[in-house]
Amino acid sequence: MDKYDKKMMNRLKRAEGQLQGVLRMMESEKDCIDVVTQLTAVRSSLDNLIGLIVAENLKNCLLSEDSELHEEKINQAIKMIVKK
């Protein structure tokens, strides 16, 4: 993937803001369930971003002229997804 979409970077910045919010919650000793709920939201956001990046990379690979790299890139994408 040659470049990342501005929407992808905005998603990451949003997740960064959520993490900062979780830190503030922990510092002010908010209830465990509230902290875990926010952490789960951050994790979900990051999982979605990972999926988007892998999908875009795979799409770009399949649209490329170099068909010899297709299988390698597909296997790489699968490993990234299954790694979770």
Image (spheres, rainbow, N blue to C red):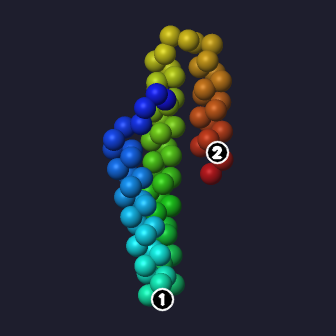
Residue 83 in percent (x, y) is at 66, 47
Amino acid under disc 2: Val
In this view, 60 is above or below 19 = above
Of circles 2 and 1, which is in front? 1
Residue at image coords 39%, 64%: 17
Residue at image coords 64%, 45%: 82
* Residue 56 shows in this picture: yes
Residue at image coords 35%, 50%: 10
Residue 39 in percent (x, y) is at 49, 69
In this view, 57 is above or below 7 = above
Q: Which residue was labeled with disc 2? A: 82
* Residue 30 shows in this picture: no
Amino acid under disc 1: Glu
Q: Which residue was labeled with disc 1? A: 29
What SS does tag 2 mark?
Answer: helix
Measure how far apart labels 2 and 1 are at the Cα level.
35 Å
State if disc 1 and disc 2 touch (CB < 8 Å): no
Q: Residues within 10 Å of mark 2 (few under 14, many from 20)?
A: few
Position of 68 compared to 5: left or right? right
Q: Quadrant of residue 30?
A: bottom left
In this view, 83 is above or below 60 = below
Position of 6 compared to 30: left or right? left
Position of 79 compared to 57: left or right? right
